[in-house]
């Protein structure tokens, strides 16, 4: 049976969860705090008043009126906060629905192109294969974008599911280096991987961790200058696993450094080098790493390169 | 010839997939909604069922549950093939006895075909 509405709305924790806001930013919780502050203020004033003023009932009445006014004002303010939060939640939901709806036709498109390219339904010439490849690449790009948008909207509403499974960073990096080999070669980038043997595992969601590291490697290779070099280091540091991804690419200008983990932010020199990109990659990466109990930081000098450092607690 | 029942409401996907798998030597049976899918599963004895979740008339999870309750169909491997990727759906489907859960957008057509062959070979 459903709980009555007023009980549901009294459960501040579940209400705040709905908006995907932390407790101290949640309108309902703030309202409660404000109420408590006001009640304390009345009592204090009353106690002080009874000691120093001849007519306590009058003072109390005045204070009570003041409090009611204060309460009404704060209620209005908080209602508007709530509307804002609701609008934000709806926006995320909208992105979610649209992305899901876009996904099905895109999968159809992708799979149909693949079927045509495979030659199973009739022979096609080399020239046609080239054009089909362009189609496939572009539908793949759209699919990636949708996937990023979906993850970002889940991060925002705090509904990104996270499995806790044993993950070998070494294995993930081996896989990724293999997957990136062609892209690195085409971009004239040399990839190096230094690792300690027998490293402990970490507890995280392996699909998400792979995505997070993939974003960092993709950036390292993508924003390269001529003769690029990407060095990856994986080692144990105390109770943690330390992962470093260092490139000698275009770097991040000092003024942009504080914004790079924000949604949709793209540094101006990144835009100069690559017009494609959503500005969601690092936002997603940071959220995933922090959700797995890890930390991410970076150092960067413009035109010299960037080093990302990740720390994960070992299992 | 192994029989595959494909329960999926998108006719475009039905066509591409059926063409590919027919070419690979499977007999394809199509169902465009959950109810028909369930009926065909019971009547045609497929060797494997490919099941979408968001289906008209009967939700995929409901179809899955019914197939696993029926002694006639409960041994048939069922692959969930959907674009829903919520943890809740994955857990529920596996709990009900689905053999595997594939999110369409994360796989190529060929990879899905490979999985099907693998599961049929292991049967």
Image: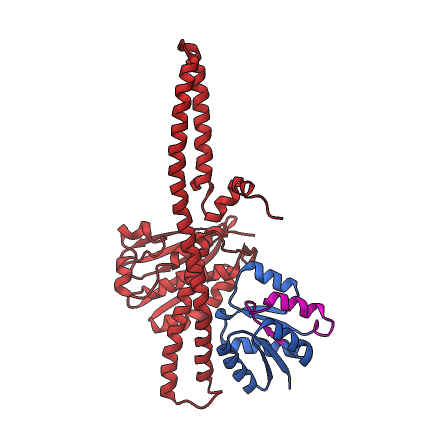
Chain colours: A red, B blue
Q: Is residue B120 visible?
A: yes
Q: Residue at x 32, y 61 (%)?
A: A248
Relative to B19, residue A253 above or below: above
Looking at the rendering, the stretch of residues picked out in magenta corresponds to B49-75
> Which residue in the rendered view is the most extreme toward the top?
A54
Q: Residue at x 46, y 84 (%)?
A: A118
**Relative side of A209 to B59, left or right:** left
Q: Position of residue A27 (x, y in %)?
A: 43, 40
> Which residue in the rendered view is the most extreme toward the right?
B71
Relative to A181, residue A304 above or below: above
State the residue in front, A223 or A86.
A86
Q: Position of residue B61 (x, y in %)?
A: 61, 65
Q: Position of residue B41 (x, y in %)?
A: 66, 76
Q: Residue at x 61, y 75 (%)?
A: B36
Report which quarter residue A180 is drawn in.
Answer: bottom left
Total number of numbered discs in the rendering: 0
Q: Is residue B73 shown in magenta?
A: yes
Q: Is residue A197 visible?
A: no
Q: Position of residue A178 (x, y in %)?
A: 45, 70
State the residue in front, A275 or A306.
A275
Q: Is residue B85 shown in magenta?
A: no
Relative to B116, residue A28 above or below: above
**Relative side of A273 to A61, left or right:** left
Report which quarter residue B74 is drawn in.
Answer: bottom right
């Amino acid at each position: 049976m459903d709980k009555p509405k007023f009980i549901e709305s009294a459960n501040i924790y579940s209400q705040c969860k709905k908006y995907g806001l932390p407790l101290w930013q949640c309108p309902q919780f703030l309202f409660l705090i404000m109420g408590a502050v006001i009640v304390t203020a009345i009592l204090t004033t009353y106690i002080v008043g009874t000691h120093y003023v001849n007519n306590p009932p009058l003072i109390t009445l005045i204070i009570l009126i003041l409090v009611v006014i204060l309460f009404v004002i704060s209620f209005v303010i908080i209602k508007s906060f709530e509307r804002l939060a609701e609008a934000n939640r709806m926006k995320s939901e909208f992105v979610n629905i649209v992305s899901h709806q876009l996904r099905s036709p895109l999968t159809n498109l992708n799979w149909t192109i693949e079927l045509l390219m495979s030659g199973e339904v009739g022979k096609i010439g080399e020239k046609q294969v080239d054009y089909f490849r362009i189609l496939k690449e572009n539908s793949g790009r759209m699919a990636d974008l949708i996937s990023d948008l979906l993850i970002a909207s889940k991060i925002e509403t705090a509904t990104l599911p996270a499995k806790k499974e044993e993950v070998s960073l070494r294995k993930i990096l081996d896989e990724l280096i293999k997957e990136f080999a062609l892209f690195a070669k085409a971009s004239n980038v040399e990839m190096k991987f230094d690792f300690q043997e027998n490293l402990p595992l970490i507890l995280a969601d392996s699909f998400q961790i792979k995505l997070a590291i993939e974003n960092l490697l993709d950036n390292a290779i993508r924003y390269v200058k001529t003769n690029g070099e990407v060095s990856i280091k994986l080692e144990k540091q105390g109770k943690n696993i330390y992962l470093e991804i260092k490139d000698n690419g275009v770097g991040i200008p000092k003024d942009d450094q504080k914004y790079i983990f924000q949604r949709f932010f793209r540094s101006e020199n990144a835009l100069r080098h690559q017009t494609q990109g959503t500005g969601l990659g690092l936002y997603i990466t940071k959220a995933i790493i922090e959700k797995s109990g890890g930390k991410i930081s970076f150092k960067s000098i413009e035109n010299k390169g960037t080093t990302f450092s990740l720390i994960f607690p070992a299992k | 010839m192994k029989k595959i029942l494909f329960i999926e409401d998108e006719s475009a996907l039905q066509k591409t997939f059926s063409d590919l798998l027919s070419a690979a030597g499977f007999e394809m049976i199509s169902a465009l909604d959950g109810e028909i899918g369930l009926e065909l599963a019971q009547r045609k004895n497929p060797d494997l069922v490919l099941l979408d979740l968001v289906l008209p008339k009967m939700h995929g999870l409901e179809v899955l549950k019914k197939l696993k309750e029926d002694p006639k169909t409960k041994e048939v491997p069922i692959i969930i093939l959907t674009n829903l990727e919520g943890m809740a759906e994955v857990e529920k489907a596996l709990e009900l006895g689905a053999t595997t859960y594939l999110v369409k957008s994360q796989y190529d057509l060929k990879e899905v075909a490979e999985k099907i062959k693998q599961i049929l070979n292991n049967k």
